Image (cartoon, grey):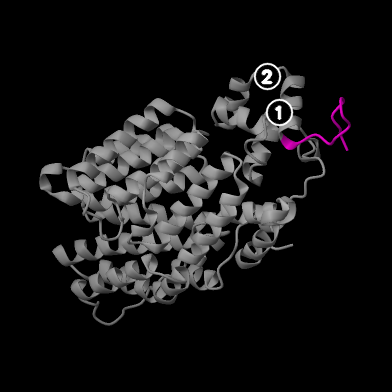
Amino acid sequence: MTHDAENGSPLTFGQRVRRERERKGQTRPVLAGLVGRSTEWVKAIETDRLGMPRLPLLLRLAEALSVDDLANLTGDERLAAATYTKAAHPSLLRVKESLTTYDLFARDEPAPAAALAIRVQNAWQAWHGFGDHRSRVANVLPALLADLRHAARAHEGADRRRAQVLLAQGYHLAQLYLSFQPAAELVMLTGDRSMTMAQDADSPRAVAASAWYLNHVFRDAGERHEARVDLAMKSIRLLDPDRGPEDIALSGLLHLAAALSFAKVGQKGNAERHWDRADGAAKRLGDGYVHPWLMFGRGMVDAYAITMNNDLVRSGAAVDAATHIDLGSMQSATRRSFHIIETARAYSLAGESVAVVHLLKKAYEASPETACFNLFARGAAAELAEGGSAIIRDDARGLARQLGVAA
């Protein structure tokens, strides 16, 4: 075990990172560039404002520092498998099979596009509703995707294009279901299929929605932020605000995608510039507008300011953004839970562990499966259950059990 030379106490993870960086003669900006993060992120790691990152980024950090043995960075800190790996939903295999099964033989007449539209709408309501949203969607997704694929092949003309647009939405739902699970290749597959269907349907709005979800895929896969922003900006050019509120909402949504992409790499000015454009779209639509399934509106734009500032490692700005919005009024339980977790992440950056536990419990109450499959929620609950202060340890242990990460 490596100890601090002055007081004999074990080195923290951040101190170990700084030690290895200085041994290598790197500056913080150089290391930041090598791992695709901001200089402020490296500083936050080295000063222990941020904890140990998840395994993929930890491995990237070790490579940038030319560290062969992860223990040189982690010391005796335990890499709990439940914390650093993704949970698997009980229906994952069934949904996987529905995506990799191909119907090569003739079927009955396809369902009417209007009837399929109602089923897709009901599936979105199941996703955004209170309770176990992943389980509800998994129950209907295999049959829905099969019927949508059949309709997209068998219908002709306008009905075929409508079925293709609906199938793109079906793949969005599959992508959301698969997210934060050990199925990265299928997340990429569903993102690509949704864009293909949107393009085949020649629907600018479907292309824009697919670009929003592909941006999430690209961020998770570590693609260059330039590629993500380029896709968003090209998709915006297909939209026309004069066509109505949906085009305005989709344009605002893609500016949010760009803001989040720039925030991930520490480009504060560009992130805030695109957030301002999303804000402008929300203002133009008015406080009462919420997109029926993408949920773009005033509340979503405000809530993503928390995420943007978290990724820029600006805890004060993130907490300030959180105190000025009412997440309880959000129409989607899944989005409400996600943004509560992002608020917990802001307080974690600020070192307020009592607030973190309180907020994660609220997130679990709002949408249990959102919290159970969120990597920050799982990691924070496990960490605080083991090493949190006495005042929160019991609550943190109970939370860890609920999230499935208890030791």
Label 2 sits on residue: 26
Q: Is residue 117 above or below residue 205?
A: below
Q: Is residue 128 above or below residue 359?
A: below
Q: Nearer the viewer, residue 148 or 247?
A: 247
Q: Is residue 131 left or right of residue 89?
A: left
On screen, residue 203 versus residue 256, left or right, reads: left
Residue 8 lies within the magenta run: yes
Circle 2: element type = loop
- Please report the residue visible at 33 percent of the width from the left and 66 percent of the height from the top: 124
- How packed is label 2: few (under 14 Cα within 10 Å), some, or many (20 or more)? some
**Mark 1 = which residue?**
65
Sequence-wise, the earlier of marks 2 and 1 is 2
Looking at the picture, how far across and down is residue 252, in whole percent? 27, 42
Residue 117: within the magenta? no
Q: Which residues are magenta?
A: 1-13
Where in the figure is residue 278, as x and y percent of width and height? 28, 40
Q: Which disc, if any, is residue 185?
A: none
Quadrant for the C terminus in the image? bottom right
Please say if 314 is above or below 181: above
The kind of secondary structure the magenta stretch mainly shows is loop
Q: Secondary structure at mark 1?
A: loop
154 displayed left or right of 382: left
Nearest to the observer: residue 13 or residue 168 = 13
Type of amino acid at the residue the image marks with label 2: Gln
Q: Are marks 2 and 1 in contact (CB under 8 Å)?
A: yes
